Image (cartoon, grey):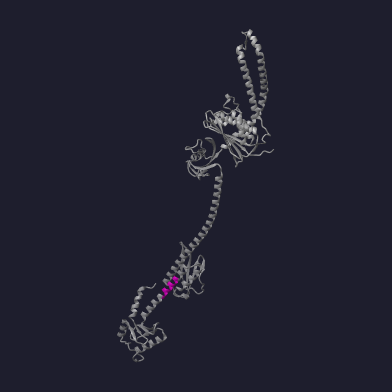
């Protein structure tokens, strides 16, 4: 750059000039030049107003001024009496002419030249910076930059600039002889990525300012490359992110769809499923009423304490599947637990499946009951036959004995009137006569009871194949049957009917259904011990299942769980001492099964009993 102290020469220059206007009058005279001229006894004030000899200093000066004005070029001039040389040069703006000492002019000219060179350098740097900042295509910009750099050198016509970046060259080729060379590395992230090469095709060297120029430009190029690469990297990252985002959106959509499907499947499972942590807190479930919080035993069983033999607890300890059946009041639940492992292979969660198997238990019980009845039916048929034959003989013979005793009684009376000391079966005659009729009647009653048992056994074992063809109006059957049943019902038991209208008819066996109703209603009556007894008989039609539902409810004593479980077993009775055979409800159970129906009982000791009969509305083929 230019040394600013040199601009002091401008002030000195003003003191060392004479200015002649277009009319050849001196309009300005510097102190120093006046002093030099006066000291040499040279007067220039009147050189244009007076005539001077041709050899005089004034004459020569006058001619030189005119030549400079006409040619518009600087002319060197030498006073004979003054050692220093002078220069006469015209101004550009008007026709004034300046006389000055040569050394002063040269220094001013050098300053002007330096200023022009620095302006060229600044223009080169500015143009380079502008192109880099506004560049859309960095490779095209590199081509232009080489031209801008050439223009910034002292002799641009003899300079050739090449830019090499990542092995690719930018700039014009020049085959002229190279006298000097200037280089500047392009460094990016401490790695040389290229260089600026300046070739000088004339003898001479480079200015230090020119070295600084290409160093500055190499830095700008480095930053431009870095910025461009970062921009490309950002764009590439944006593209990758967009692609990843699209993929992520697709994956998210698929995950959402899969999650929704899983939720649907999970919620559609009728079993109650929960995922619990080691503190038995629910963290996930498939039912809204359970939710995703709270203790599992509280949400599943409304219990404040953990279940005995909790399968989840065993799974947490063993890390294996477990299964356990739990009874909760009148319901049965099958609990299954499965371990969920973390990355370390530890069981930190458990999936528990709670299935209500109450209906399965009932069906299983009914199947067992059916198997019992089926196998027992065959046995009963044989036993009934074997018992009936001898009992018929016994009953017939007892009747003959009764008639014979009545016929022989007068003879015995006459005999024992004369032989009062005689005994029969170690009994006095009067005692024998009084008790023999009682004994005989007891035997006849026992034989008749055996006969009734045999009839019940036959009914139990009997299975009619062609008897379910009658059209049954269940409401009508109940109303008509009550007239017949009423005489068997205790006086303290009232019957209340709640019969739903418009119940469809179905094919069945009226006699057998009457037997079922009679058995259940009589049992209900016998269970009522207190006054104000009530037996409710209700009917309705379940359209969704297309079945008839009959409910018979009493407010009697009810029964315990053990009795309820065995109520349909053959020969099971709590009234053995009252003559009960334990076959009535077993027969009723079999009749309802013949009608493809089901019969259930609900009871609690001290709270009465409810029998529920389900009969499907199915038209049998004739």
> Magenta part mainly helix, strand or loop?
helix
- In this rendering, is residue 132 above or below 487? below
Q: Nearer the viewer, residue 615 or 106?
A: 615
- Per the rendered image, the range of residues in magenta is 116-126
The reply to whether residue 428 is in sight is no
List x then y, in percent, for residue 68: 40, 85
The N terminus sits in image quarter: bottom left
List x then y, in percent, for residue 357: 56, 37
List x then y, in percent, for residue 349: 50, 43
Q: In the drawing, does residue 394 fall left or right of residue 525?
A: right
- In this rendering, is residue 12 above or below 622? below
Residue found 33% across the figure and 89% down from its top: 46
Residue 553 is inside the magenta segment: no
List x then y, in percent, for residue 399: 66, 19
> Splitting the image into 4 quarters, where does residue 495 fall?
top right
Q: Nearer the viewer, residue 150 or 508?
A: 508
> Splitting the image into 4 quarters, where does residue 51 fall?
bottom left
């Amino acid at each position: 750059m230019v040394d600013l102290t040199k601009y002091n020469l401008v002030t000195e220059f003003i003191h060392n000039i004479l200015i002649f206007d277009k009319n050849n009058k001196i309009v300005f005279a510097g102190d120093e030049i006046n002093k030099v001229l006066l000291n040499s006894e040279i007067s220039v004030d009147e050189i244009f107003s007076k005539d001077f000899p041709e050899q005089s200093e004034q004459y020569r000066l006058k001619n030189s001024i005119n030549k400079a004005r006409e040619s518009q070029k600087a002319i060197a001039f030498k006073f004979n009496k003054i050692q220093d040389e002078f220069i006469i040069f015209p101004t550009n703006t008007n026709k004034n002419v300046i006389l000055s000492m040569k050394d002063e002019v040269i220094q001013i000219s050098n300053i002007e030249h330096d200023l022009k060179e620095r302006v060229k350098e600044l223009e080169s740097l500015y143009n380079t910076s502008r192109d880099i900042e506004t560049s859309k295509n960095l490779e095209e910009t590199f081509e232009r930059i080489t031209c801008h750099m050439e223009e910034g050198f002292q002799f641009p016509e003899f300079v050739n600039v090449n830019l090499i970046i990542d092995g690719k060259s930018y700039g014009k080729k020049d085959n002229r002889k190279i006298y000097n060379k200037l280089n500047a590395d392009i460094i990016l992230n401490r790695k040389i990525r290229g260089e600026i090469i300046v070739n000088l095709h004339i003898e001479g060297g480079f200015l230090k300012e020119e070295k600084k120029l290409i160093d500055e430009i190499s830095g700008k190029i480095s930053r431009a490359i870095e910025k461009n690469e970062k921009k490309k990297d950002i764009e590439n990252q944006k593209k990758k992110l967009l692609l990843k985002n699209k993929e992520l959106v697709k994956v998210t959509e698929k995950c959402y769809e899969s999650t929704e499907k899983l939720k649907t499947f999970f919620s559609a499972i009728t079993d109650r499923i929960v995922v619990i942590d080691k503190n038995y807190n629910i963290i996930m479930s498939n039912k809204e009423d359970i939710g995703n919080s709270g203790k599992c035993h509280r949400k599943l069983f409304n219990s404040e304490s953990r279940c005995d033999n909790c399968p989840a607890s065993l799974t947490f300890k063993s890390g294996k599947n477990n299964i356990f059946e739990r009874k909760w009041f009148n319901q049965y639940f099958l609990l299954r637990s499965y371990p969920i492992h973390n990355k370390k292979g530890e069981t930190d969660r458990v999936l528990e499946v709670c299935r209500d198997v109450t209906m399965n238990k009932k069906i299983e019980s009914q199947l067992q009951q059916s198997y019992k009845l089926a196998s027992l039916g065959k046995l009963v048929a044989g036993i009934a036959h074997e018992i009936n034959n001898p009992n018929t003989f016994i009953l017939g013979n007892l009747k003959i004995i009764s008639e014979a005793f009545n016929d022989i009684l007068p003879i015995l009376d006459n005999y024992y009137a004369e032989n009062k000391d005689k005994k029969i079966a170690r009994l006095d005659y009067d005692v024998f006569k009084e008790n023999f009729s009682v004994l005989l009647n007891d035997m006849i009653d026992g034989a008749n009871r055996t006969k009734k048992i045999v009839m019940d056994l036959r009914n139990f074992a009997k299975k009619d194949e062609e008897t379910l063809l009658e059209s049954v109006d269940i409401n009508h059957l109940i109303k008509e049957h009550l007239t017949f049943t009423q005489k068997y019902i205790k006086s303290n038991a009232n019957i209340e009917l709640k019969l739903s209208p418009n119940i469809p008819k179905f094919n069945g066996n009226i006699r057998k259904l009457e037997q079922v109703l009679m058995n259940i209603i009589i049992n209900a009556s016998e269970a009522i011990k207190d006054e104000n007894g009530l037996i409710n008989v209700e009917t309705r039609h379940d359209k969704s299942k297309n079945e008839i539902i009959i409910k018979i409810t009493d407010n009697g004593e009810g029964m315990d769980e053990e009795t309820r479980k065995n109520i349909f077993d053959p020969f099971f009775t709590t009234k053995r001492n009252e003559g009960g055979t334990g076959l009535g409800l077993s027969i009723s159970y079999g009749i309802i099964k013949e009608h493809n129906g089901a019969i259930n009982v609900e009871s609690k000791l001290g709270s009465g009993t409810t029998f529920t009969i389900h009969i499907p509305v199915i038209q049998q083929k004739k």
